[in-house]
Image: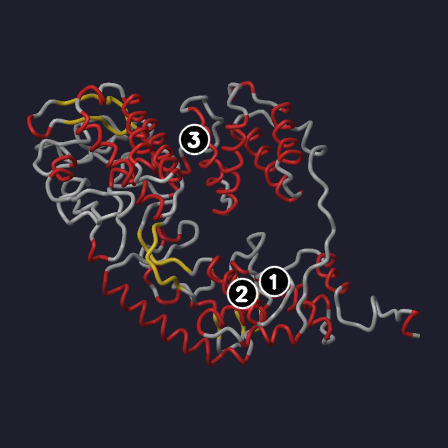
Amino acid sequence: MSVLGGKADTLFGGLDRGWGVLDYTDVQWIREGTGVGLEGAGERGVVRRDAGSREVPTWVRRLVLARGVRLSEKTLYWWGVHLSRFLKHCRCAGRGASEDLATAVGQFLEAMGEGGTAKPFQVEQARQALDVFVAGVENWRWREDGERAGPVFRLKATSVAGTHGGNGPAGVERVGGEPGAGREVLGSGGGPRRSGADASEGADVAWDGTGGLAGLLKTMRNALRVRHYRLRTEEAYLQWAERFGRFCEDRDAQDWGGREARRFLEHLALERNVSASTQNQAFSSLLFLFGTVLGRPLESLAGTIRARRPERLPVVLSRDEVRRMLATLEGTVGLMVRLLYGTGMRLMEVLRLRVKDIDFERGQITVREGKGAKDRVVMLPESLRDGLRTHLDRVQVLYDRDRADGIGGVWLPGALSVKYPNAGTDWGWQWMFPSKEISVDPRDGARRRHHVHDKTLGRAISDACRTAAIDKPVTAHTLRHSFATHLLESGADIRTVQELLGHASLETTMIYTHVMERRGVAGVQSPLDG
């Protein structure tokens, strides 16, 4: 089953006729034409200049998803550019360059470096894309077919054996397609598997040693998802597992043990000089990797190798500093920052607010799935009522436009999208602070509108502090610290503050008593002032 089909204007025909040439010094947009995609699915898979966005060929997206690689849309687009240029290079270079895939890759990267148009980081980016390509394809060969002669390959199977449609093996997706061949898709469903189905595959079974590091990471991802770990935790654990695997590449994974874990953590602490919290995060990832994925728990190291975290006081802004910073912020960003300070919510708690979570009648905000998967209720600042209502009117306009354009509904937690299929398009479930751009869900590949990115708010806070001449290291969490400290200074009960912050222990809240503004430290006057 070939990625290149017999129809006219498939990949190489399109590259030669009407797609233009992509140069690394002055990239020209690929002109609209018949792209590489799923036959009969209506997926163009081409970059359209008038669309104002960068679309990725379907086969490249499927290849990357199948190998378990997480990329931003921008990086994924450039991977598609590199892989398309590589395939065209193989076709133009002739049979000699394409008989051996490894040789073809080496010749292409060498040509990139010697051409003078590609920068070193672009060559490295192409190398990474080709590493995934080599690992994700099979049956690389040359097909002589008149003018459309070129390399032929197929995507490797990525699912377990089972029932499937079409007339080829399960788990293989035909890209391009041959006449009358029909369509084969990943797995036994009708498209990319959702996170629940993907997570169930081998989630509670230790890694069987197949697939190399990519197979190990896939098993670990499934185990994390079946245990409902947060996406950020999943990304962090997988990153550390991959770094550990590359650190131990001189030893087979079946031989990994406590010795390798110690060496890696010592490398992080002594050579990389990471902080104690970073080292502990890496160690937590290794505990999960060994205990759940490899089936060899690091019980002897669990209580001995964790780094001792220093006890530090939180950074707190004075009331005047808060006023000066807020005076520089307007619009949606200003509203979010005021919510951070006015409610004590964490950064992601504000970003994940949905329309239904704001109760104007009762004057409260419900925080869903906070830290530790706990819900809580915080006050709705009176000064923000009108601003939030006006903001919701603008969000309503964006919501109506998305419904008219047929854009999929918002992401729903757990299996709510299965239990209530239409809930994602309901007004109450929409994000309170939606992003301006449409994005691709990293778990199921669906195109939908997500909430504002956390870095957007972080940059706005940093810029506001510079404008307000605040020299303290301020982040979104600093506003949470300031909220708690200012409440205590105003005479609020510490247990009330604990409940508003969502702290499980009163000791965690008591740290703010050490930074309260009182005369002298802890209310004691210096003898110099006596």
Residue 461: give its label.
2
Tell me: 268 left or right of 384: right
Please report the residue visible at 30 percent of the width from the left and 33 percent of the height from the top. 112
Find disc 1 in the rendering and name its residue.
474
Tag 2 near tag 1, CB within 8 Å: yes
Percent position of residue 464, x then y: 54, 69
The answer to whether residue 429 is above or below residue 244 is below
Residue 202: give its label.
3
The answer to whether residue 417 is above or below residue 150 is below
Considering the image in quadrants, where does the N terminus appear? top left
Residue 211 position by quadrant:
top left
Please report the residue visible at 85 percent of the width from the left and 70 percent of the height from the top. 523
Percent position of residue 33, x then y: 13, 46
Tag 1 near tag 3, CB within 8 Å: no
The answer to whether residue 219 is above or below residue 474 is above
Please rate how many residues cluster around mark 2, counting C-alpha atoms within 10 Å: few if below 14, some from 14 to 19, many from 20: many
Nearer-N-terminus badge (2/1):
2
Specify the amino acid type for callout 3. Answer: Gly
